[in-house]
Image (cartoon, helix red, strand yellow):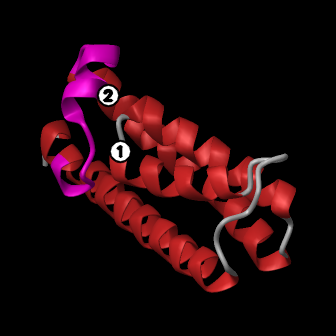
Amino acid sequence: MTVQELYERIDGSYEYAKKILMMDPLIAKFALKFLDDGSCDTLLTALAAGDEAGIFAGAHALKGVCANLGFNSLSQAASVLAEEFRPGSPRTMDQAQVDSQAAQVKALYDRTVAAIRQFQAEQ
């Protein structure tokens, strides 16, 4: 699998990553480092505990990391939770909607990690 194929599998923006990091080996290096990022775990733990500040922190960090790497789908899904739990902003989602959005984030995260691991195995 090429770096470009990895980005296609995760609905990412290879063009954005290429513009920022310029070379496929560098894009690959940072995509592989994503496997060590703990922001999704922080988000999921906070969701399970009902910790609104932790939800914001985890979602905001995940959104940022994914945006910087061009992992657009996951970044956008995490952004919805970050905005919902942004301190000082009114809540607009009920618990069922939060749970649904969290499930979407988890599914996209799992898909992204699986694709990166497959990419890693093929290198």
- SS label for mark 1: helix
Tell which circle, 1 or 2, labels the residue nearer the N-terminal end: 2
Quarter of the rendering containing residue 14: top left
- SS label for mark 2: helix
Secondary structure of the magenta portion, mostly?
Answer: helix
Which residue type carries mark 2? Ile
Nearest to the observer: residue 69 or residue 59: 59
State the extent of the magenta-drawn residues as a range.
8-23
Is residue 110 something that shows in the picture?
yes
Q: How many marks?
A: 2
Which residue type carries mark 1? Asn
Q: Is residue 60 left or right of residue 74?
A: right
Q: Which residue is mark 2?
A: 27
Across and down, in percent, residue 30 comes to 43, 32
Q: Which residue is mark 1?
A: 72
Across and down, in percent, residue 86 comes to 75, 48
